[in-house]
Image: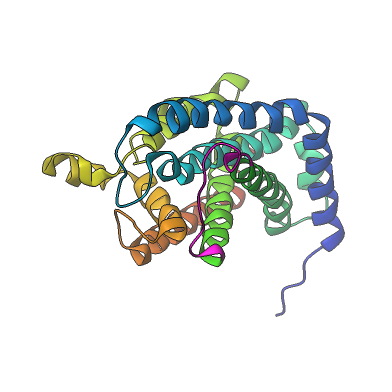
Amino acid sequence: MSLSLNVHAIQAIYRFEMARWFRTLAQSVISPVLSTSLYFVVFGSAIGSRMASIDGVSYGAFIVPGLVMLSLLSESISNASFGIYMPKWAGTIYELLSAPVSWVETVIGYVGAATTKSVLLGLLILATARLFVPFEIAHPVWMLAFLVLTAVTFSLFGFLIGIWADDFQKLQIVPSLIVTPLTFLGGSFYSISMLPPIWQKITLFNPVVYLVSGFRWSFYGVSDVAVGISFAATLGFMALCLAAVWWVFRTGYRIKV
């Protein structure tokens, strides 16, 4: 049996989410860009100019991929989780569940919009970084691939958080207490080769290491982890998120109750 998608439903969800994003540009775009710009000023220009290069890359340029990933992960989770939580909070989720819209179409609409927002924000931060730090992108196609794949993966993860959360406070627990610390400890501001051997091994259990390492390789051709492993780890996490989303809609966990 061929798979046919309700394109109109997908477009309706997607356009609604994008319209909401444009209504809150100050919070959704300007705020994260300004926050990241402060990192470039402090770490890239002020501190970076006094630090030695890492793997032949100036410190200011070295942290660019990590800072982009820091914003990308948090914004992907935030956009997707808030997008699906609001219909739950307002009660309009039941209209969506009773409509002739499959779970695949629902996920494509919400996650697609969250991914678009995050990718646009990531590209905007990259453009802003050029104002503070000179850098080159050695593999632009791979850079876009890692950018989009990471945005999709963590938008799916954020979608799950939005379904799990039953109040606004819980929407911030996982990003604030888990994802952000893992990003800071995942080689965003340093190479894990600078750590003692025992901590290098421990750090490899941090999934963010593979994201940052692969993304940094696309810029400078240097990485802490082989790019193939980074790519496979990202695909594996995305597969886990997809499986979890399928289970949620199959069982109705925190959606139908």
Q: Quadrant of residue 208?
A: top left
Q: Quadrant of the N terminus?
A: bottom right
Would residue 254 be seen by someone viewing this image from the given angle?
no
Q: Position of residue 252 (x, y in %)?
A: 61, 44
Q: Position of residue 43 (x, y in %)?
A: 43, 29
Does the stretch in magenta take in 132? Answer: yes
Q: Position of residue 71 (x, y in %)?
A: 55, 37
Q: Residue at x 50, y 65 (%)?
A: 139
Q: Quadrant of residue 187?
A: top left
Q: Quadrant of the C terminus?
A: top right
View extreme (bottom): residue = 1
Q: Residue at x 61, y 45 (%)?
A: 122
Query: How was this image coloured?
Result: rainbow
Q: Position of residue 243 (x, y in %)?
A: 50, 56
Q: Using the image as rendered, state which of residue 112 and residue 72 is in the foreground.
A: 72
Numbered label tally = 0
Q: Is residue 127 left or right of residue 44?
A: right
Q: Which residues are magenta?
A: 128-140
Q: Quadrant of residue 185?
A: top left
Does the stretch in magenta take in 251? Answer: no
Q: Predominant secondary structure in magenta?
A: loop
Q: Residue at x 39, y 64 (%)?
A: 232
Q: Residue at x 80, y 47 (%)?
A: 13
Would residue 230 be seen by someone viewing this image from the given angle?
yes
- Is 165 rendered above or below residue 136? above
Q: Is residue 145 left or right of residue 20?
A: left
Q: Using the image as rendered, state which of residue 132 and residue 137 is in the foreground.
A: 132
Q: Is residue 46 left or right of residue 81?
A: left
View extreme (front): residue = 49
Q: Using the image as rendered, state which of residue 56 and residue 234 is in the foreground.
A: 56
